[in-house]
Image (tube, grey):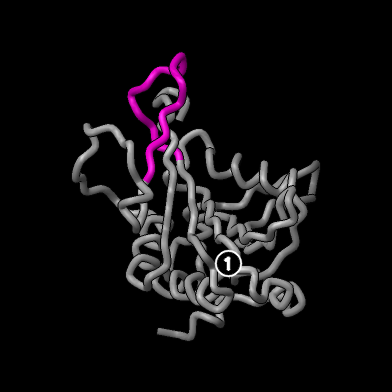
């Protein structure tokens, strides 16, 4: 495997400001397991209401399939005038109580999952992150007239309780977030996630 650290560049000053803080690392990727754009809404809300600065930027050209997800561009009269490019960023965020945490946002990687997972978990290890946290939305046969059901999953079974018994053992196509949590558990880092059950007609 090519050195995972070559996948990103980081801001040394922001990095040093996190020494001894043991920040929680939240990862919210767009593109899969994101019914009703739950992850985009969550990350947008956090960045809108909290102070933040970029800690690290990943080399998206190595991770993205542009023919699978093409950037939106604007053509005006006789020329291209703008382009919404993709970015995969790790932010240092500070909450209302002054507590810093990390937020990884952007499109789910299309390739190099193992290397990307090593990169993210390497950052978490070097900053001594206390928890890996995520959220997602899945389309379900539930009505919008009822409170949104939220279920949980974790590398520590004690943190994922109260889920309905009709969910047992299933096999589904994996997501990068799921793989990241799985790999985190193998390294001894606690991973925790919450899933919003979105009415299928809104997904």
- What is the x, y in percent for residue 51? 77, 53
* Quadrant where the image shows the N terminus: bottom left
* Up/down of 166 relative to 135, above or below: above
Of residue 179 and residue 25, the one placed in the foreground of this image is 25
Asked if one can make out residue 33 in the rendered structure from this viewpoint, the answer is yes
Give the total of numbered labels.
1
The structure residue drawn at horizontal position 26% and vertical position 48%, both measured from the top left corner, is 172
- Horizontally, residue 104 falls left or right of residue 196, namely right
- Horizontally, residue 111 falls left or right of residue 123, namely left
- What is the x, y in percent for residue 181? 39, 60
The structure residue drawn at horizontal position 54% and vertical position 73%, both measured from the top left corner, is 128
To which residue does mark 1 refer?
60
Residue 30 sits inside the magenta stretch: no
- What is the x, y in percent for residue 106? 58, 55
- Horizontally, residue 83 falls left or right of residue 165, namely right
The structure residue drawn at horizontal position 51% and vertical position 33%, both measured from the top left corner, is 36
Instruction: Residue 14: name its quadrant.
Output: bottom right
Of residue 175 and residue 103, the one placed in the foreground of this image is 103
SS for dot 1: helix
Image: magenta residue range: 137-152
* Quadrant where the image shows the C terminus: top left
Q: Farthest residue to the top: give it.
A: 145
* Up/down of 139 relative to 75, above or below: above
- Horizontally, residue 187 falls left or right of residue 93, namely left
The structure residue drawn at horizontal position 67% and vertical position 56%, both measured from the top left corner, is 85
Residue 140 sits inside the magenta stretch: yes
């Amino acid at each position: 495997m090519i050195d995972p650290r070559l996948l990103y560049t980081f801001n040394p000053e922001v990095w040093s400001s996190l020494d001894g803080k043991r920040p929680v690392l939240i990862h919210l990727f767009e593109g899969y397991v994101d019914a009703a754009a739950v992850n985009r809404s969550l990350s947008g809300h956090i960045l809108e209401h909290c102070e933040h600065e970029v800690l690290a930027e990943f080399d998206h050209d190595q991770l993205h399939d542009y023919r699978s997800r093409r950037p939106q561009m604007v053509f005006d009269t006789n020329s291209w005038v703008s382009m919404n490019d993709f970015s995969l960023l790790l932010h240092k965020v500070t909450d209302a109580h002054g507590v810093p945490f990390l937020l990884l946002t952007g499109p789910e990687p299309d390739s190099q999952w193992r290397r990307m997972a090593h990169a993210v978990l390497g950052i978490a290890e070097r900053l001594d992150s206390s928890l890996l946290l995520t959220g997602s939305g899945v389309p379900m046969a539930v009505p919008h007239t009822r409170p949104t059901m939220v279920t949980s999953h974790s590398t520590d079974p004690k943190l994922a309780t109260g889920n309905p018994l009709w969910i047992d053992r299933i096999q589904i196509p994996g997501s990068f977030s799921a793989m990241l949590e799985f790999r985190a558990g193998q390294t001894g880092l606690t991973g925790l996630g919450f899933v919003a059950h979105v009415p299928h007609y809104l997904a």
